[in-house]
Image (cartoon, coloured by chain):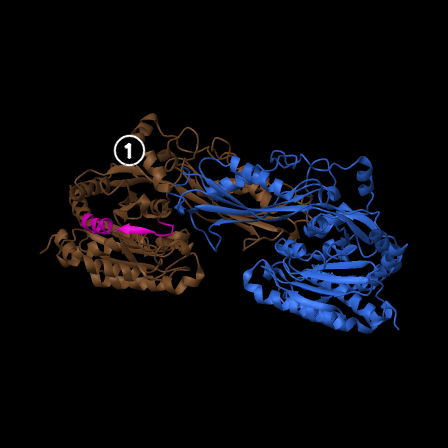
Chain colours: A blue, B brown
Amino acid sequence: MMTINQYIEANKDRFLEELFDLLRIPSVSTDKKFKDEVVKAANFLKNSLLEAGADNVEVCPTQGNPIVYGEKLIGKDLPTVLVYGHYDVQPADPEHLWLTPPFEPTIREGKIYARGACDDKGQTYMHIKAFEYMMKYGQLPCNVKFMLEGEEEIGSVHLADFVRANREKLQADVILISDTSMISNEIPSIATGLRGLSYMEVEVIGPNRDLHSGVYGGAVANPLNVLCEMIASLKDERGRITIPHFYDKVEELSPAERQAMSEAPFDLETYKKELGIEEVFGEEGYSTLERASVRPTLDVNGIWGGYTGEGAKTVLPSKAQAKISMRLVPHQNSEEISQLFAAHFQAIAPKTVKVNVSFHHGGEPVVVSIDSVAYKAAEKAYEKTFGRKPIPKREGGSIPIVAMFKRELGLDSLLMGFGLDSDAIHSPNEHYGIFNYLKGIETIPYFYQYFAEMSQK
Amino acid sequence: MMTINQYIEANKDRFLEELFDLLRIPSVSTDKKFKDEVVKAANFLKNSLLEAGADNVEVCPTQGNPIVYGEKLIGKDLPTVLVYGHYDVQPADPEHLWLTPPFEPTIREGKIYARGACDDKGQTYMHIKAFEYMMKYGQLPCNVKFMLEGEEEIGSVHLADFVRANREKLQADVILISDTSMISNEIPSIATGLRGLSYMEVEVIGPNRDLHSGVYGGAVANPLNVLCEMIASLKDERGRITIPHFYDKVEELSPAERQAMSEAPFDLETYKKELGIEEVFGEEGYSTLERASVRPTLDVNGIWGGYTGEGAKTVLPSKAQAKISMRLVPHQNSEEISQLFAAHFQAIAPKTVKVNVSFHHGGEPVVVSIDSVAYKAAEKAYEKTFGRKPIPKREGGSIPIVAMFKRELGLDSLLMGFGLDSDAIHSPNEHYGIFNYLKGIETIPYFYQYFAEMSQK
């Protein structure tokens, strides 16, 4: 028998090659033209689970993209881990900014560059390889179930239906998710909070057609100018969001919690330098770490309208559009915030335009307890493989399904993420460290071991 | 011999067919991919001039698109009319909003629908057909020169060089241009003023790459939000432009002039209804007609950044861009205003971003005298064909070359436009009334006749 370290050493080339094959599939869920690729990625994972030794593996159809399910049940009295991951990825655009093509994985300086390398194909595939090891050497200490979806990047549209329809089958003791980041490769951390999300799209409509800016300019409200004014008014000079009642339910951290956060390793100068910015910006009275994790946000994710081609066109356009999303913090509710946004955006529209507001998707904020058996088992596993205790850390991103799992299955999730904030997920040149990929594969079996042991106590 | 009316009656189908052939050429000057089409349109006009009887016709190369020149010189002691027109057109986009394809001219309800139908292929071609009539029946009463360019929609980039290099050849008594509009088919008008233009492009750059809006949102300035805030700040709540010194040189109309303008036929309810808007918007204290003609403007002509595809992408983008143009009124100077804009836009940029400002093109505002022989001859010609005296009217659009002609050739221009504001130039479904096209062909020979007669007095 090999130890997990020996097994990784002997198989790491294959582990990389297999992941590369998965990364070559452009399974972009937000764009329908990649529909076939999404299905291809699902089938790839089905085969990977089968080869690793899972039973009852199937690609379960949904109204949208399929969910890959597989399991290994070894004993009714043993605890059960339900592994969640997602095989869909963000769009690769702007593609011209990638140094190497987004769907041709390339290694540079010890990192795998590809869309999905970290988020979440790399982090999902670690679990299958860790499972492969445990199966191969009879080291699986508990039951395991896999549920790998293809709609995480578009709001897990059909996952709740699947979960509701399979409540019995999905029963477990904890949900294990690797879709977050650590502080650094030297300082492991476990995510203990996630922000929620409300993602909106707005349309500002002025005249019934594009107009000549000379003939009509100055006399007719320009929807592009109006949209800019409306967006600008959504924050005040202190960086506070102006939507009425937006902050009503926002969890305020205690001075002790803020103190603890301020002690987390963070260097503002390095942060600014790494992003190439001279100054940071955010809500007055909060630190950068707080702004990026425990405070809500409002960001324009996309804006367009008028003439955007080469050269100049003197047009006063009929329409302006934007995608605007808000990150939410504990106690805020995604649907409620979406409604507050829509009502406010309509209310601030001048009479010169018509406004349409629609809702893309959302998710609820989450706080993870650090007192659970699962958290303590994970803490011990990281200590074993990293040589130091992980730090509990609030994350700024959203994994909306964590709140849904709690609601529908009554289960808590454990967020064992091995990525780094600098992995450029959702950006050009997304990457994932080979160190991180292999460290994940190494740490996961220890988690299973400790979780099984500690559950029995 | 036929009268011009009889000639039009006998030839109108051919006049339309020939114009349709010209309209089928997508001579879009702002987009390099149409380069060959632009040259094709120039050659088309060369042939039209030759067939109508012009001498010395040539397609003159420039550093950019060629200029078509032709002339008929019949006597040194006779006055000379220099006809200016342009054969390039605006881009057709958004193409999906056209009811019939932009480069397949179609007649609906007495109107020719096509990109360039009015601006300015239709209005240019009238002059060639009027010239054809005068040549055919020995009715040309003075010398005529044609100068038809292919870069009007991109700021006539190479026309000034051409004019400077051909000062002798271009000597004339007046420049005749049909590239403006009338009040209505029942109420003819002659343009007596044009606004100038400064067309800028701005770029707001934040982080050195697109970021995940969850990981960084709230902590890093979002260039899209910043651009919106900067644009919003360019106007105050009274609709006044906030760029320092922007209004310093703006011509203020006398109460008498404002009174005269207020008596021009205009119905605000019809105007709003025709545009499908509930309310107009513009600078406080001025009427809609004033806002659209004698007051300067600032309009966003295009904006883009972030994710603009289908669905949602939670990105905090690296960059935001916009095209912003200002219409200028007499005494404002395009270069000076462009510099004021650039300096102000840099000055209001927060330290969280970098800003680039570039200049596309511009043009100076113009006022045309109503006391010239040319104006009085035109007035008489319109009275002859429309049965009523034309009203002098300030226009909101820009024909930057009018100021350039004055500067380089010392010549005044006469703006005999036959279009309507509702012709949707620069918009989808641009059109030009068959009535207007033929009325132009009918009126132009009378202008030549009266201009020659009145010049001799």
User: How far across and how far down the image is residue B352, in percent?
Assistant: 65, 44
Tell me if B184 is positioned left or right of B277 in this view. left
Question: How many numbered badges does the structure rendering display?
Answer: 1
| In this view, A115 is above or below A410 | below
User: How far across and how far down the image is residue A401, in percent?
Assistant: 68, 52
Specify whether residue B438 is painted magenta.
yes
Rendered-image quadrant of the C terminus of chain B = top left
Residue A280 occupies quadrant: top right
Tell me if B186 is positioned left or right of A422 in this view. left
Q: Residues within 10 Å of mark 1 (few under 14, many from 20)?
A: few
Residue B412 shows up from this direction: no
Q: Amino acid at mark 1?
A: Ala
**Residue that numbered label 1 is attached to:** B264
Question: Which chain does the residue under circle 1 lie in?
Answer: B
Specify whether residue B391 is painted magenta.
no
Rendered-image quadrant of the N terminus of chain B = bottom left
Of B63 and B281, nearer the camera is B281
User: How far across and how far down the image is residue B420, in percent?
Assistant: 29, 45
User: How far across and how far down the image is residue B410, in percent?
Assistant: 32, 45
Outermost residue toward the right? Answer: A457
At numbered mark 1, what does the secondary structure look like: helix, strand or loop?
loop
Residue A395 shows up from this direction: yes
Tell me if B191 is positioned left or right of B286 in this view. left
Tell me if B61 is positioned left or right of B136 in this view. right
Q: Which residues are magenta?
A: B425-443
Of A98 and B354, nearer the camera is A98
Outermost residue toward the top? Answer: B255
